[in-house]
Amino acid sequence: LVPRPAVAIETPTALRGSTSIDPNWEPFNATNPYKESWCPKAECLNSPLCLPCKRRHFIIVSTARSGSTTLLRMFDALPNMRLAGENHDELHYISTLTSNLLNHRPNLLKHPMDKPTGPFMHNTIPKGSMGCRAQDIIHTLNPPPLDVQLNKSINMEEYDEGLILGFKTVRLHQSGWSGNEAAEYIKTHFPCTRILVNFQTNVTHQYISYKRTFNHTEGEEYLGPTMERLQSINKFQQEFHKSLPGMSILVDLDKWSRDVGILNKVAKWMGYKNCQFEEIVHENNKGYATDEETVLSVGENCVYPLQKDYKSFGGN
């Protein structure tokens, strides 16, 4: 049997992760435990089933061959942070848990009322509660180290309670969303999030890196993205960033790769104090090589001082 080539799954326009429920449906409360720190503009749709702002997230949304793995390694070195790598655009597939319900009739998430009879009988599903289910999946893909998991004396929930969790992705633009639609999903399902949006202005250099690194050729025909497509992806990144005011920061590989101070400013924007990257590590150099020479340090006094004891934070 001849293996079939991988085919990108296109998302029908009608199922692009619609997240608008009923704007007049008020949550049980909208208390934000990190209003003074990580996510001051978050809309927290709290209920007895879900506190969507209880967990803080950090997501690196990047284009491929633009330093995303370097950013992953460097920001994962910050205290109180645990990041995971690529997950095959799992965020998009998670979004279909919500869009499947919103785009069918009857809409099970639309109204704040019980439906005690009929083929679709169900009790009220609180507004915003799907956000916690989405976060649970992302958390599952970014668990504590195995030695911690095997330690029966450690409570996993308590171990992760104060951490900022996140991941990096270079495939968000493949979801079928516009930049604005992708941002809307993040805001409604991961409201307490900060996002580092990364791209590369020099698409010619990026194009050459694609051809050199990935097996996108059959014979002499190049099957990877064209420079026009790379420019289109950059436009997606910029639209995504502009749709998340206060939640995201935009960086350009062509600038930060020459100036580590740009990444130090990002750490400061995140709320970290006394954190100083001394050098840029170079992950995936000439392909997939790990930088084992550069000493990665954030400084002995690097801290994230803006903590919140949310044990007293409830959904009522």
Image (tube, helix red, strand yellow):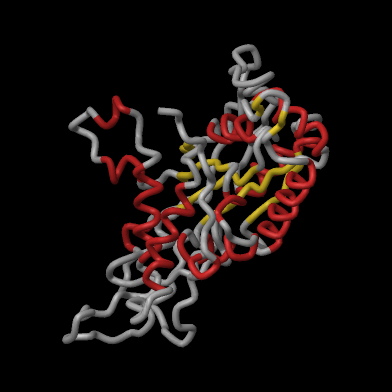
- The residue that appears at 54% across and 60% down in the rendered structure is 39
In this image, 223 relative to 167: left or right? Answer: right
In this image, 140 relative to 249: left or right? Answer: left
* Image coordinates for residue 203, horizontal then vertical, percent: 80, 39
Asked if 19 appears above or below 143 in the picture, the reply is: below
Residue reaching furthest front?
1
- The residue that appears at 60% across and 48% down in the rendered structure is 271
- The residue that appears at 62% across and 41% down in the rendered structure is 273
Q: Quadrant of the N terminus?
A: top left
Front in this rendered view, residue 293 or 159: 293
Q: Quadrant of the C terminus?
A: bottom left
Name which quarter of the figure residue 267 lies in: top right
- The residue that appears at 23% across and 28% down in the rendered structure is 150
* Image coordinates for residue 4, horizontal then vertical, percent: 47, 35
Front in this rendered view, residue 130 or 207: 207
Asked if 48 appears above or below 237 in the picture, the reply is: below
Asked if 310 appears above or below 22 in the picture, the reply is: above
Count of picture labels = 0
Asked if 146 appears above or below 45 in the picture, the reply is: above
Residue reaching furthest top?
293
* Image coordinates for residue 65, horizontal then vertical, percent: 68, 33
Front in this rendered view, residue 293 or 289: 289
